[in-house]
């Protein structure tokens, strides 16, 4: 069973930085499509923040472009999201997500497409 587990959330002031980490267990394929999604307070559904694939494709939401950076340590099998210059509107529960390895070729690895496995989330709160 593929299980992403997030860490690194917390409270930060506007303009500050934070790094989220995601350890994925049960995923053995060298090819991957993984990403970060978030759900703001009082809002239904999750929005794509950033995705990264093993072929080098990276996609960001326009609202975080230039401020957030997604990366992966392949040796540690850990996905990261570096949040810089955060804003109060970045306050949300952040979820790490993984596409099923059997579905890698079904769609491009972009934020507009969902994933199959999600972690339980890590809370990021930005104060002004």
Image (tube, helix red, strand yellow):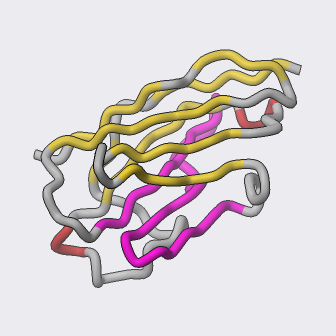
Near-viewer residue (83 or 39)? 83
Q: Position of residue 88 (x, y in %)?
A: 81, 30
Residue appearing at x 42%, y 47% in the figure: 79
Residue appearing at x 55%, y 24% in the figure: 9
Residue appearing at x 68%, y 39% in the figure: 83
- From this view, report whether residue 44 is shown above or below residue 5: below
- From this view, report whether residue 28 is shown above or below residue 123: below
Q: How many marks?
A: 0
Quadrant containing the N terminus is: top left
Give left or right: position of 26 versus 65.
left
Q: Position of residue 27 (x, y in %)?
A: 17, 53
Q: Magenta span covers which residues?
A: 32-61
Q: Is residue 58 located in the magenta-colored stretch of the structure?
A: yes
Give left or right: position of 58 versus 29.
right
Quadrant containing the C terminus is: top right
Residue 78, quarter of picture: top left
Residue 107, quarter of picture: bottom left
Give left or right: position of 17 versus 42.
right
Q: Position of residue 8 (x, y in %)?
A: 51, 25
Task: Determine the residue located farthest toward the front in the rendered image.
Answer: 75
Q: Is residue 60 located in the magenta-colored stretch of the structure?
A: yes
- From this view, report whether residue 111 is shown above or below residue 12: below
Residue appearing at x 14%, y 57% in the figure: 28
Q: Position of residue 5 (x, y in %)?
A: 32, 33
């Amino acid at each position: 069973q593929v299980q992403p587990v997030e860490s690194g959330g917390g409270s930060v002031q506007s303009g500050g930085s934070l790094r989220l980490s995601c350890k994925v267990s049960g995923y053995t394929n060298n090819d991957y499509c993984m990403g970060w999604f978030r759900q703001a307070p009082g809002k239904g559904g999750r929005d794509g923040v950033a995705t990264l694939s093993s072929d080098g494709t990276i996609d960001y939401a326009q609202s975080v472009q230039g401020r957030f950076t997604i990366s992966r340590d392949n040796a540690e099998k850990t996905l990261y999201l570096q949040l810089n210059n955060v804003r109060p509107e970045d306050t949300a529960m952040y979820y790490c997500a993984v596409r099923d390895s059997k579905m890698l070729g079904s769609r491009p690895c972009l934020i507009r497409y969902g994933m199959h496995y999600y972690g339980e989330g890590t809370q990021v709160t930005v104060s002004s």
